[in-house]
Amino acid sequence: RWGGAVLGRGVRVAGNDFDQAIITYIRMKYGLLIGANTAERIKIEIGGVGQKSGGKTMIVRGRDLESGLPRSVKVEEGEIMEAMVLKAQVIAKTVSEVLDQSPPELLNDVVAKGILLVGRGANLRGLATMLEHETRIPVQVIEEPGMAVIRGCGILVEDRKKLQLIKRVAGES
């Protein structure tokens, strides 16, 4: 059943923000300049915001800020978690604020059914656990979370009544 939006809040934290946090951390700690592609690879291979998964390490290559020459450093997963956790806490805080402002009836449904994580960021290791700890509500990542928006758009294209409902909720006519 489609009942429309009750409460909404956007959070300006996305995958690129986690990448930038990694770039900044590596620059500050090691004096090494890395690019966005390297940061993305670090995030995927050893990044996360939860407990360490066994002390993963990675050799990172970049440009030494002092000499301007290429240099490699070995980074540990704990360091990368440290770089990323503040961004993840912004997400967790926003989720908690939305839950705090939700009507009791809606909150009862959320507590009973849990929270579903969607979007590519849902794959960030430890994010679901962090949100579950913060909210004390079960959190699960849907299958193929990066495809959720595309699937939702497909549903709206196929069912014009649902599309009209969304337009009304968004304040359009």
Image (tube, helix red, strand yellow):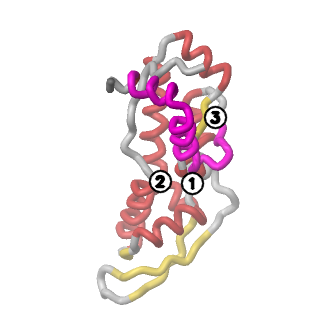
Residue kind at label 2, given as amino acid type: Met
Q: Which residue is mark 1?
A: 48
Element at label 1: loop
Marked residue nearer the N-terminal end (1 or 3): 1
Q: Is residue 75 among what the camera can see?
A: yes
Q: CA distance from mark 2 to mark 3?
A: 20 Å
Residue name at image x 51 percent, y 41 percent: 153
Residue 144 picture location, percent across and down = 64, 49
Q: For this view, does 133 lie left or right of residue 30?
A: right
Which residue in the protein does label 2 denote?
84
Whether residue 50 appears in this view of the structure is no
Magenta region: 139-168
* Residue 148 picture location, percent across and down: 57, 44
Give the overall secondary structure of the magenta segment: helix
Q: Amino acid at mark 3?
A: Val
Question: Residue 21, percent across and down?
Answer: 40, 58
Label 1 is placed on what type of residue?
Answer: Gly
Q: Nearer the viewer, mark 2 or mark 3?
A: 3
Q: Residues within 10 Å of mark 2 (few under 14, many from 20)?
A: many
Q: Are marks 1 and 3 in contact (CB under 8 Å)?
A: no
In which quadrant of the rendered image does the C terminus lie? top left
Q: Nearer the viewer, mark 1 or mark 3?
A: 3
100 relative position to 2: left or right: left
> What's the CA distance linking mark 2 and mark 1?
7 Å
Where does residue 80 sit, x and y in percent of width and height? Answer: 51, 60
The reply to whether dot 2 and dot 1 touch (C-beta < 8 Å) is yes
According to the picture, the residue beneath numbered tag 3 turns out to be 139
